[in-house]
Amino acid sequence: MKNRTTVERKSDRELVVTRTFDAPARIVFEAWTQPDLFKRWWGPKSMGMALLSCEMDVRVGGGYRLVFGPGLEFFGRYLEVTPHSRLVWTNDEGGDGGPVTTVTFEEKDGKTLLVMSELYPSKEALDAAGTGAAEGMVELFGQLDELLVTLGASAGRV
Amino acid sequence: MVQYTNAALDASFAALADVTRRGVLEQLGRAEASITELAEKFNMTLTGMKKHVGVLERAGLVITQKIGRVRTCKVGPQRLEEATAWLEKYRQLWAARFDELDQVIEDLKQSEKFAGRKPRE
């Protein structure tokens, strides 16, 4: 049975993901900090995604670069690296509006509670990353367009 | 696809038939705003903007809330559903990643056991 992944919008500008893993923190931490291991799950395959390359210099001030394909790259810098318990990094691919990601690993009875937070500089930045305000409007108008076409067609038949 | 009653459909079309109201909706898609702010932005009188917002509100495209003396407008329920849908997609991505991470972790545990050595510190 898989453990449950939960997501919560903690505040206007923060998203928090939690998940328990059936292993000690040092093992979970290893899978987050060794590029060859990280590459195996960050994809993920079940969503039809895969990392082409993964470079990680896991130390304070060190950089990382994750490449899914041409033009689809994610990169930033590590702000904090505390073995087996805490990682903090920036997400710089989108310019200034990117969030800061904090991952904590808390071990209890041989299991690890992982909490990942993405803190955006503003509510607007989170909204833009998520719902895509403009995109939402395009979709809304698109739906109405569809309705109009349907209605036009049925009116034509009368 | 959302099921519309004829009345709701009429209200939506009427609401969107006006260029100012479409502009207001786009503006609110970016950020909440008070009626006063919207009136200024669209160079209108307060009364005129109140009418437009009223039409959008009756169509369910906008919701308003009065806090103190200020009436704040934001995009209506349809938009809220989109927000929820996005959060669920985000959750699914992380659930998929973590289910694969389980496998990586299982392999690491196995190789440690196999090596029969004390775990690294």
Image (tube, coloured by chain):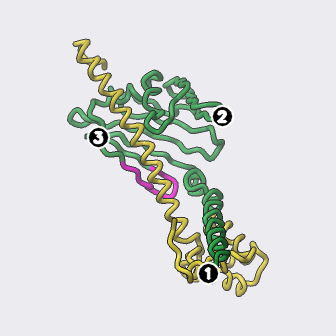
Q: Which mark is residue A71?
A: 2
Q: Residue at x 52, y 60 (%)?
A: B82
Q: Residue B116's image quarter?
A: top left
Q: Could you tell me if the residues under marks 1 and 2 are in contact, i.e. CB atoms within 8 Å?
A: no
Tell which chain the image draws in yellow: B
Give residue B38's position: percent from left, percent from top: 70, 74
Q: Position of residue A99 (x, y in %)?
A: 55, 45
Q: Secondary structure at mark 2?
A: loop
Q: In this image, B8 relative to B114: left or right? A: right
Asked if residue B30 can be seen in this view, the reply is no
Q: Is residue A68 left or right of residue A18?
A: right
Pointer 1 residue:
B10
State yes or no: residue A10 in magenta: yes
- Asked if residue A93 shows in the view, the reply is yes
Give the chain letter at badge 1.
B
- Extent of the magenta region: A6-15
Q: Reply yes or no: does residue B30 show up in magenta.
A: no
Q: Find the distance from the CA under tag 3 to the CA under tag 2.
A: 33 Å
Same chain, marks 3 and 2?
yes
Image quadrant where one finds the N terminus of chain A: top left
Q: Can you identify the residue that label 3 sits on?
A: A2
Residue type beneath disc 2: Gly
Instruction: Say how many tags the image has.
Output: 3
Q: Position of residue B37 (x, y in %)?
A: 69, 74
Query: What percent of the width, then of the height, locates residue A102?
Result: 45, 40
Residue A126, compared with residue B47, is above or below; it is above
In the picture, one chain is green; tell me its letter.
Answer: A
Q: Quadrant of residue B31?
A: bottom right
Looking at the rendered structure, the kind of residue marked 3 is Lys
Between marks 1 and 2 in the image, the one whose residue lies nearer the viewer:
1
Report the disc number at residue A140.
none
